[in-house]
Amino acid sequence: GQNIDQPTEMTATEGAIVQINCTYQTSGFNGLFWYQQHAGEAPTFLSYNVLDGLEEKGRFSSFLSRSKGYSYLLLKELQMKDSASYLCAVLDSNYQLIWGAGTKLIIKP
Amino acid sequence: DAMVIQNPRYQVTQFGKPVTLSCSQTLNHNVMYWYQQKSSQAPKLLFHYYDKDFNNEADTPDNFQSRRPNTSFCFLDIRSPGLGDAAMYLCATRQLLGRMDYNEQFFGPGTRLTVL
């Protein structure tokens, strides 16, 4: 079967750095997405990785290792508004998105 | 601004009473998706349209139907809502460029459905 694993919940302090991990087992791989979802709102696109390595976008970076079936989202200089769920999703061989359940990130002052 | 719009944002219906959720887009994307998302769970794809071609997920209950009368609009019909159908329903769009290309999906704000 296809499976995406992420921690259910993480807590971090304002101004700190946090890394949210995602491991996947899918039938084929055509890229990995990270989305941010605030409570009661729709997911918004953060990043897309299809090649190994680190992609940096301001305070957010995303890393991919295809051989390990592993990605992480790195958030720096955390702000209170970063409190949200972070969803990892993999595009499988049929170009269908397989979603993880999301990691709820709680930021404390 | 180009966007994905869902109406209503909150919908309350009674057990067994048909309900229709709507989605419209100004992005002119050729693919539209309907997802069901329950609390702390991954979005679950119900079906999608590539232009007018309808694609139903194998495990989508027959109780759920969809219509796409034109590029801009897509509807989700729940024929006989049960208590288990209470969830957030997300509409998303994307532009399919070609088999080897993939753009991100753009989501609407969602409709939260309550079944009494």
Image (spheres, rainbow, N blue to C red):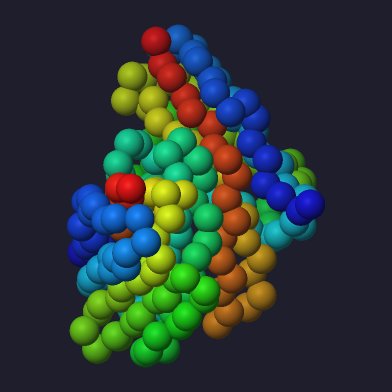
Judging depth in this view, the residue of B45 and B103 nearest the camera is B103
Judging depth in this view, the residue of B35 and A79 nearest the camera is A79
Residue B16: percent from the left, percent from the top?
A: 43, 13
Q: Residue at x 35, y 71 (%)?
A: A74
Judging depth in this view, the residue of B76 and B12 nearest the camera is B12
Which quadrant holds residue A16? bottom left
Is residue B14 something that shows in the picture?
A: yes
Residue B53: percent from the left, percent from the top?
A: 62, 55
Q: Residue at x 20, y 57 (%)?
A: A7
Left or right, residue A74 beside residue B93 = left
Q: Quadrant of the C terminus of chain B?
A: top left
Q: Residue at x 37, y 89 (%)?
A: A53
Above/below status of A105 relative to A58? above
Above/below status of A23 relative to A109? below
Left or right, residue B4 beside residue B28 = left
Q: Residue at x 22, y 62 (%)?
A: A5
Residue A27: percent from the left, percent from the top?
A: 29, 74
Left or right, residue B47 beside residue B4 = left
Is residue A73 something that shows in the picture?
A: no
Residue B25: percent from the left, percent from the top?
A: 72, 47
Number of disc labels: 0
